[in-house]
Amino acid sequence: MARLPGSDDRRGTPRFPGALGPPGAGTCPGGILTVAEPTASFRPRGSPAAETHPRMSEIVLFGPLTAPFTRKVVSALKLKKLPFELKEPQSPEDYLRWSPETGLLPAIEVDGTHAHDSARILDLLDERFPEVPLVAQDPKAAQSQRRLEQWAEAAFTFYWINYLRGLVDAEENETPPRHHLREEFAQRLDDLVNFLGGRPYFYSDEPSRADLAVWSWLEGVRDAVGPDVAEAVEARPALLEHGARVRALIDR
């Protein structure tokens, strides 16, 4: 059985070789997973927003939708059935304009309250909109879900960056790709299968921020990293079924 890593600081950042920056921070200008798209508005399906939330809140999310950290926040908003407006960056200046503290996205404004870092954004959403909580009621399960969220994001960021570096090295120096990273990535997928166990969601029978974090990364990794990685994910039915459950909850 795999174990979650320990913490390097008081924020509980998992120890993982080469992890770049705090998990959940987001993307920066010129970094990976950026896209420019028109502004979009999202409302819960099935019923008008006013009926779902009588006291309408103004929620604006800033970030590229293709970025896993932004996708995680979008999935949390949809899970809570909160209407929101998504503004995606169209220039490097947008990052500093929308997130002057760090220059990283996603960032969010909820009725004038500004927050950045996807983990902090989810904390804010649970505080302001407790319906459909993003962690389990059981304290131990909730702690495990938060730690898994951090671990998964640190791990996948590490492998994503090193996969891209391997492609560049192979092209520029005619060196073979880093095959050992693929093997380690497959091991991390096995860790996730073990963490999931026989439950429909991580550490609970209800979805949490851990499920959203894992789904947000695996959804993008299969599409963008390469056939070997996609096959590694698809070779694990438990992860595919988990992803299908999360997507069904978000899309309903």
Image (cartoon, rainbow, N blue to C red):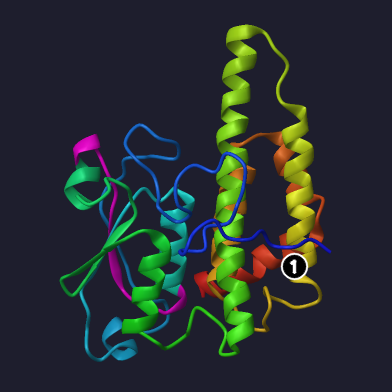
Residues 7 and 161: in front is: 7
Q: Quadrant of the N terminus?
A: bottom right
**Secondary structure category for the residue under label 1:** helix
Q: Which residue is mark 1?
A: 195
The image quadrant of residue 116 is bottom left
Residue lying at 67% horizontally and 8% vertically, measured from the top left: 174
| Residue 76 higher or lower than 3, as above or below | below
| Residue 70 higher or lower than 110, as above or below | above
Residue 24 x/y as whole percent = 45, 56
Instruction: Please state which amino acid type lies under the numbered disc 1.
Output: Phe
Residues 52 and 20: in front is: 20
Residue 5 x/y as whole percent = 66, 58
Residue lying at 67% horizontally and 75% vertically, measured from the top left: 201
* Number of numbered discs: 1
| Outermost residue, top side | 173
Query: What crowding class fits label 1: few (fewer than 14 Cα within 10 Å), some (14-19), or many (20 or more)?
Result: some
Say whether residue 191 is left or right of residue 123: right
Residue 85 x/y as whole percent = 26, 63
The image quadrant of residue 162 is top right
Residue range highlighted in magenta: 79-93
Residue lying at 74% horizontally and 67% vertically, measured from the top left: 195
Q: Is residue 50 magenta?
A: no
Residue 148 x/y as whole percent = 62, 65
| Residue 168 higher or lower than 185, as above or below | above
Asked whether residue 229 is in view, the answer is yes
Residue lying at 49% horizontally and 42% vertically, measured from the top left: 20
Residues 239 and 23: in front is: 23
Asked whether residue 247 is in view, the answer is no
